[in-house]
Each structure stands twice: as structure tokens, then as C-alpha cells.
Image (tube, grey):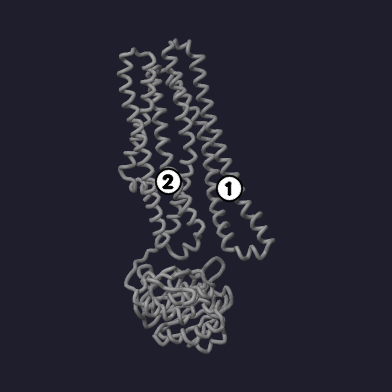
Amino acid sequence: MSIYLMLLRTTGVLFFVALACSVIGGLSNAALLALINQGLSATEAQRWQLAWQFALLALLMLGTRTLSQSLFMAMGQRCKAELRRKLVQQVADAGYADLEQHGMPRALSVLTQDLDQVVVFFIALPGFVMSLAVIIGCMGYLGYLSLTVMMIALITVLIGSLGYSGVHRRALQLMRQSRQREETLTGEVSALFSGAKELRLHAPRKQAFLHNKLFNTIEQVRVERTRGYVLYALANIWASVFFFAFIGVVMFLLANMLDLHGAVMSGFAMVFLYMIVPIETALAALPGLTLTQVALKRIQAMQQQLPPEQTTFGAPPLSFHQLELRDITYQHEAFQLGPLSLQFRPGELVYLTGGNGSGKTTLARLLTGLYQADSGQLLLDGEVINESNRAGYRQLFSAVFNDFHLFEDLQGIDSTRWNDEAHALLDALQLTRKVTLVEGTFSTLSLSTGQRKRLALLVAWLEDRPFYLFDEWAADQDPAFREVFYHQLLPALKARGKTVLVITHDDRYFHLADRCLKLELGQLVSA
């Protein structure tokens, strides 16, 4: 479904009610002009009657304008929330490889700036529609005064619109370029925080990053955005030139030719002056409406680039007899992993070694179902893992990857284990002085890398899955904790019948494994 249809479905009939209120408010505004013009030549008795009409029209205009603005504001927030829920759900349901390719900066940019721009659209729309209604109402009143003048006005508007549209297209292009550039800026600002240590320890790198990248991107955004708004200003000037040219031609050149008397001329003058503000308001709203169009296209692009996995969450396996990789291959750019054939059984402790870039983490993500192999089969007790059962299959694993994320609470874990095992593990991992656990929530995550990994190990332990995977877990630990990890924790998991795969370079502990696997350039060289 198109994102535009989704927005209409979210707002429902309220959108058309608010739109109708804007139109009524605009037409009422134009009608007030006609009453004012009538009042200038009316008798005293007629003025009393016109006064009541004026009061009613003024109340109608103010009421519909207020209602329209309130409804559009509420709809803007509703659409923003609904889009945010859908996009967050889409991120949660997308394949892991697609998420990696899409990148966090782009997603954050869409979930924040682009969604905020949707709200701007709903804020700007009532004023834009009301201004158009005022202009249409004034043109209708012009037709009432003189059809010839109205036709001249329509021709003037047509010519002005053609010139405006050409400039508008170029401005739109610049707005799109600046929006894409802001995406790059988001990533660079993120790097400013994540690389804070490195930048402060290397002053030349800091200066080069700021001046060659960050400041340059900021300047490019400024230039492109400024050019876009300047073009909008030129377009507005173009429209104003034609408008005032029309006023000059009618008032000073055609007045005698058309034999227009004083009352009609005063009516024309009022209409012309009255139309200036609505025209400027409508033109001023166009940049915001244009940016909304850009934002909606980016939101739609994100939806297309992050399709949900075609998988259903079945009952997670509580145990298994054999997990097999059969002739598995995976290609990423120039690197190819496999073909690989491996088997894992319950109660087995396996070490996986190899140099950087050999494919260890890629293999781990294939094994856990985060990546989908290009060829070959992944089998659990002889059953092929495919789209229909991959989500359930992934629940077989508790994993601590090298790039793990630590959540602040233990949601999804049996609460009885919080009070029993969790506190005992905190003590065993020497974290009780740093972290407390209250109702399944950690008191702090402001810990060293090694301490955070110990906390991640605690979470994985409490998950109590059949298969455990540790990606370079001990690399950031003190020697004492390495001893605990290799001599106590891993054997304890094995004794509980868990299958354990450890990615490691600690050759001092290789003898503790049931078998060691080694990868070189994506190929298994020993098993």
C-alpha cells in the first residue's frame, strides 16, 4: 500500500472534515471582503443587516480556521506516531543483513527528521488550503464585478504558474540533495561521538575530520538548502511581479477602456490588496510542503529497502540431537565463505580460530540464522531451516557477539531466575559492587568493556538456550576472568548438556575443547 494511502487511512474522515473547514474558512474570508465592499456604498439600514452577516461570517471563518488547525495538528501527531510504529516494527522484522546494509544513520534520519517533516506538512496544510480558498473566492468576486478582468487575472495566474513551476522543480532537486547530504552529516556526527577518544588522542586526525569532512558536509548542506530557498524566493518574486503587473494594467490602463466606474474600481482595489497576503502565505508554505514530499519518498524508500523476513515464529526448539551445515557458502562483495560442512551435537565444546577476516563471525551469523546462505543447507535434526522456520530456529541460541548490545533489563527471561541465579552470577563475576539488579533491571550500564561483556554473559546464561556462542568474549578480560571463563563457566555449560562454540585466539586453552576448527580466507583448514 502506498504511504499516501496509509496516511489517508490513518486520518480517516477527519482529514476531509479538516480540509472542508479550511475551504469554508477561506471562502468565508473572501465573502467578508464582498460584505466590506458592499458596506462602503450601503445605506444606514443596509449596514445594520450587513453587520449581522459580517459577524456571522467572521465567527464562521474563525471557528472553521481554529477547528481546521486543531484537527490537522492532531492528525499530524497521529500520523507521525503511526509511521514511527510501522517503521520500528519494520526494522525489528527486517533481515539482519538488510539492516547492516541499510545502516543506522539513514534509519535514524528517517525516524526523526523525516517524521518531523510529516508533522510540518499537517501544520502548513490548513494555511495553504485556506489561502487558496481565499484566492478562489476573490477571483469569483472579480468575476462578479467584471468577467473581462477575471479572465485577464486567470491568464496572468497561468503565465505566472508556468514560470514558477520551472523554478520550483530546480528548488525541489536542491532540497532532495540537501536532505541526502544531511544523512551523511548524521553519520559523521555519530562518528564524532563514537570516535571521541581517538580524535582527542590524535590532534591532526581531529582537525582533518572536522575540516575535511564534518565542516565540509555542514557547508554543503547550507549551500544546497540556501540555494533551494533562494529559488523559492525568486519564484515568489516572479509570481508577485505578474500580480502587480496585473494590478497596474487593470487599474491604470484598462480602466478607461473597460468603462469601469468608481465603485467597481474601489472593489477591484480592495480585492487586489486583499489577495496579496493569501498569495504570499500560499507561496511561503510551498517549501515546507516540498520537503514533506521529499521526506515521504525517503520513508517509502526505507520501507522498500527493509522488507520483512518471510518467516513465521514457531515453537522454539528446547533441545536438538544434531545441527548440520551442509556445503554452506556465503558471498559478501569480494569475500566468499565456504563451501563448509560441519556438525554440532549437544554437550560439545568447540573452539573456532582463524586470523582477522577469515570468516569466523560470518560463520557464526550463518550458524545462528542471522545470515542466509547463498547455497547449501542448514539442518536441525535432519529438518532443513528455511524461511518458514528460521525465526523459531534462532531461538535455539544464546550468543554474545563481539559487537553485542546490552539492554538495561532482563525482559523475556523468567523472573524467578532474576532472584536466584542472577545475583549469584553477579557475585561470581565480581560485579556486585558495580551493578545491582532490581526487578529485572540493571542499576547502571556505565561499565568498562570487560565488565559489560561479563554482564552480557550473565544475560546469556539466564536465557538457558541449548546452544551457546561466544565471539572473542575473553579478549577484553583480565587473566583471572579468562581462567574462570575457560576452566569454570564453559565446562559448566557443557556439563548441563549445552553445545558451546567459542571464537577465540587463546591457544593456551585449546586443549580444553572437544575439537578445534580453523578458518583461513573463508575455508576450513582443520577440524
The percent coordinates of residue 104 (x first, y second) are 50, 60
Mark 2 or mark 1, earlier in chain: 2
What is the secondary structure assignment of the residue under circle 1?
helix
Identify which amino acid the numbered label 1 is placed on.
Answer: Val
Residue placed furthest toward the right: 204
The residue located at (31%, 26%) in the rendering is 56
Residue 221 tag number: 1
Q: Are dots 2 and 1 in contact, CB under 8 Å?
A: no
Asked whether, in this view, residue 349 is left or right of residue 27, the answer is right
The residue located at (51%, 29%) in the rendering is 239
From the viewer's perspective, is residue 232 above or below residue 93?
Answer: above
Circle 2: is it few (<14), some (14-19), or many (20+) Cα within 10 Å?
Answer: many
What is the number of callouts on the image?
A: 2
From the viewer's perspective, is residue 157 above or below residue 221?
Answer: above
The percent coordinates of residue 219 (x first, y second) are 62, 48
**Residue 516 seen by the camera:** yes
Q: Quadrant of residue 227?
A: top right
**Residue 524 seen by the camera:** no
What is the secondary structure assignment of the residue under circle 2?
helix
Residue 119 tag number: 2
From the viewer's perspective, is residue 293 above or below residue 105?
Answer: above
Query: Which of labels 2 and 1 is toward the front?
Result: 2
Asked whether, in this view, residue 263 is left or right of residue 101, the answer is left
| Front residue of 177 and 50 | 50
* 3D distance between C-alphas at marks 2 and 1: 22 Å
The percent coordinates of residue 59 (x first, y second) are 33, 30
The residue located at (44%, 20%) in the rendering is 270
Identify which amino acid the numbered label 2 is placed on.
Answer: Val
| Front residue of 296 and 45 | 45
Circle 1: is it few (<14), some (14-19), or many (20+) Cα within 10 Å?
Answer: many
The percent coordinates of residue 488 (x first, y second) are 47, 86
